[in-house]
Image (cartoon, rainbow, N blue to C red):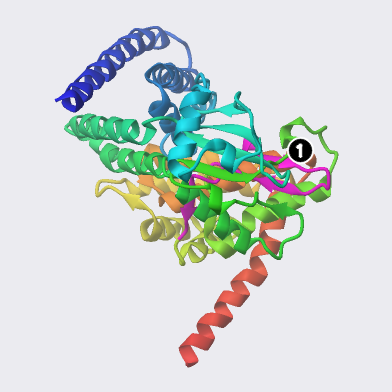
Amino acid sequence: MARYFGYAWRFITIWFITTIALTVYGFARLYIACLPGAERRRAAVARLRGRVLRISMTTLGATFIKLGQVMSSRPDLFEPETIDQLRLLQDKIPPFGIDAARKIVEHDLGRPLAACYAGFDATPVAAASVAQVHRATLPDGTEVAVKVLRPDIREKCIRDGAILHALARMLAWNATARLSDPVGHLDAFVEGIIEQTDLTNEARHYTLFHQNFAAVEGVRFPHVHTALSGPNVLTMDFVRGHKVDSLPQGQDEVLGRRLRLMFFKMCFVDGFVHADLHPGNMVIGVDGGIAVFDVGLVKHLPEDLLDQFVDFSKCVAMGTTADFIVHMKTYHRYMNDVDWDAVERDIGGFIGEFRAQNVAQLEMGQFANRLFALARKHRVRPIPELTLVLAAIVTCEGLGKILNPHVNTWNEMATFLMPVVQQRMMAKLMAAKA
């Protein structure tokens, strides 16, 4: 009975805050409608939408903060101004007490805290929506980071996910809203959040990243101490270093290239991508290497994604607008009433502007934003995996430009892809002959 009461009360809370948010949004839209200029009004509406979402999600707590952070990685669904607001979502949640943390650790590991660690800091070094991290030392003196899930966070995420699923179904009653598949996208978002509430998943991700980058110099992931880890506790080596965005601009061209190659390898060789990679989840060690952590959110990419991306790149570099339309019809999702003649006209103008620019000076972020804007306009959806790759490359370019403002991401990506594509073609030929 208490469980159903909790669901009902949470539903009422979500409904109440949503109603207030929509009311504020509606009144603000009336003001924006008076602004001069169509582009200015569009940007203002997108910014307002992001601000209302950010404030509402912050008010609703952990699950919604995490949901907003995941949403900020989907430029195919949201406009740049909206995403800029969602990226401001921070895990500004008070830490839970040491007594609760001790209880969780001892329950998961089956022994007293003192039997596991020689020292365990009572105050966490970081507190986020799903977990918090304590610094500790092992009996042999090794400094470790102990990630501890928040009490009952999994149950809360499942509860909020069920309520959001019901609300998304209600939203899908509207034919216009249904075009964006709110139920499917929301379920995918929530599934990713719930997966992060079992730290055995994150431990497994670390193992895979260790295997994938074992032979790569200058890229490392913290070692996980499996004997001191479980569903609610993850013990790993403590990582020290400087954040990428705190380094002076243009200081290290080699480091910037290493960062980009790390992204390319994840996307085009391993098919296993850190889906929440930003300056807060990596540091530069004293040895100049990149240490990457917080790998709870990942994405497995399909085998044929490279073929799709290569085809996409050919269309952009040398294809006609008709080639681009064929690519979109083959690899993208769209409704039956898409005006393909209008899409072709817009694509023709877009590609013409792109090819008129100096490729060395082209901003990948601007290119991707224009492309996603066209897709949203015509209700053509790139597959989520391609969106993730493009978003990852844009992030990679942004971080890389901190270290080297004059980087040519297009050339580096083409250089990286050529041998990869050749190897795949050879493998296919060998398989066909066999």
Q: Is residue 73 magenta?
A: no
Residue 89 visible here = no
* Residue 323 drawn above or below residue 376: below
Residue 244, percent from left and from top: 73, 37
Q: Judge left or right: residue 403 versus residue 78.
A: right
Q: Residue furthest left?
A: 1
Q: Is residue 285 magenta?
A: yes
* Residue 173 drawn above or below residue 44: below
Q: Which is nearer the eye, 348 or 82?
A: 82
Q: Residue furthest right?
A: 251
Query: Which residue is found at the position 72% from the left and 61% from the top?
Result: 216
Residue 245, percent from left and from top: 72, 33
Q: Which is nearer the eye, 233 or 99?
A: 99
- Which residues lie in the magenta part? 276-301
Query: Which residue is found at the position 76% from the left and 54% from the top?
Result: 218
Residue bearing the label numbered 1: 241
Residue 201, percent from left and from top: 46, 50
What is the secondary structure assignment of the residue under circle 1? loop
Q: Judge left or right: residue 286 versus residue 329.
A: right
Residue 4 picture quarter: top left
Query: Which residue is found at the position 71% from the left and 63% from the top?
Result: 415
Q: Which is nearer the eye, 231 or 313?
A: 231
Residue 319, percent from left and from top: 54, 60
Quadrant in which the N terminus appears: top left
